[in-house]
Amino acid sequence: MNISKIVDNLKGHEKGFPPVENWNPDLCIGPEFKIDREGDWYYDNSQIKNAKLINLFASVLKKEKQNYYLVTPVEKILVNVDLAPYKIIDFEIINENIKFITNLNYDFYLDKNHSTRLIEIDDALLPLVNVRSNIEGFINRNTYYKLIDFALEKNFKYKNDLYVPSFNKNHIIGKIA
């Protein structure tokens, strides 16, 4: 299986998110996809640089248990993900709510369905965010520092937690030492 064949299998699904939750094809062994710690995509150890192609692949991501897959109506391919598929590259405050902007042509608001959780990586706590359909995103370093500055400026602290409020929910972004 090659990238051209995968793209052919997705014809007609270029806009929005296809119904991958309804697609349950057999696992295709062979091609290797990876998303590294920086959010860069690879196919058989070669970086994919075509943004339209990456956005198309991101639209057909599916998470089953702890694994991510690219899913078409006829095949399912494992994607090895170092941290999370989406990278949050900025945020906006709109009507006192947080809107995250991702690297994959998708924006969303922090709310009860799109919340944060802290994970430990290399002795540090990092927030992951549920972007869509249990597919997570990580916050890039610059955006994370900007978010921390905002939370500290507004004194969004509770016990040892640093958080940002959005849509009547406090979303934890870190721990206070």
Image (cartoon, helix red, strand yellow):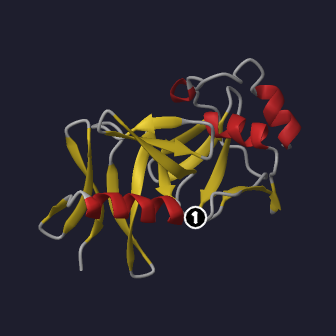
State which quarter of the image contains the C terminus.
bottom left
Residue at the far front: name it: 153
Label 1: element kind: loop
Question: In the rendered image of this protein, does residue 99 appear above or below residue 123?
Answer: above
- x, y percentage for residue 26? 65, 37
Question: Could one spot residue 133 in this view of the protein?
Answer: no
Q: Check the image and report above or below for 109 versus 34.
A: above
From the viewer's perspective, is residue 3 above or below residue 146? Answer: above
The quadrant holding residue 59 is top right
Name which residue type carries label 1. Answer: Asp
Q: Residue at x 51, y 28 (%)?
A: 21
Of 17 and 144, nearer the camera is: 144
Q: List the residue tagged with mark 1.
A: 82
Q: Residue furthest left?
A: 159
Quarter of the image for residue 126 reads bottom left
Please name the residue shown 39% across and 82% down the image.
Answer: 123
Residue sitting nearer the eye, 158 or 33:
158
Please give the name of the residue rendered at 71% of the width and 24% of the height, measured from the top-left corner: 14
Q: How many marks?
A: 1
Q: Position of residue 156 (x, y in %)?
A: 21, 58
Q: Position of residue 109 (x, y in %)?
A: 39, 36
Q: Is residue 129 left or right of residue 54?
A: left
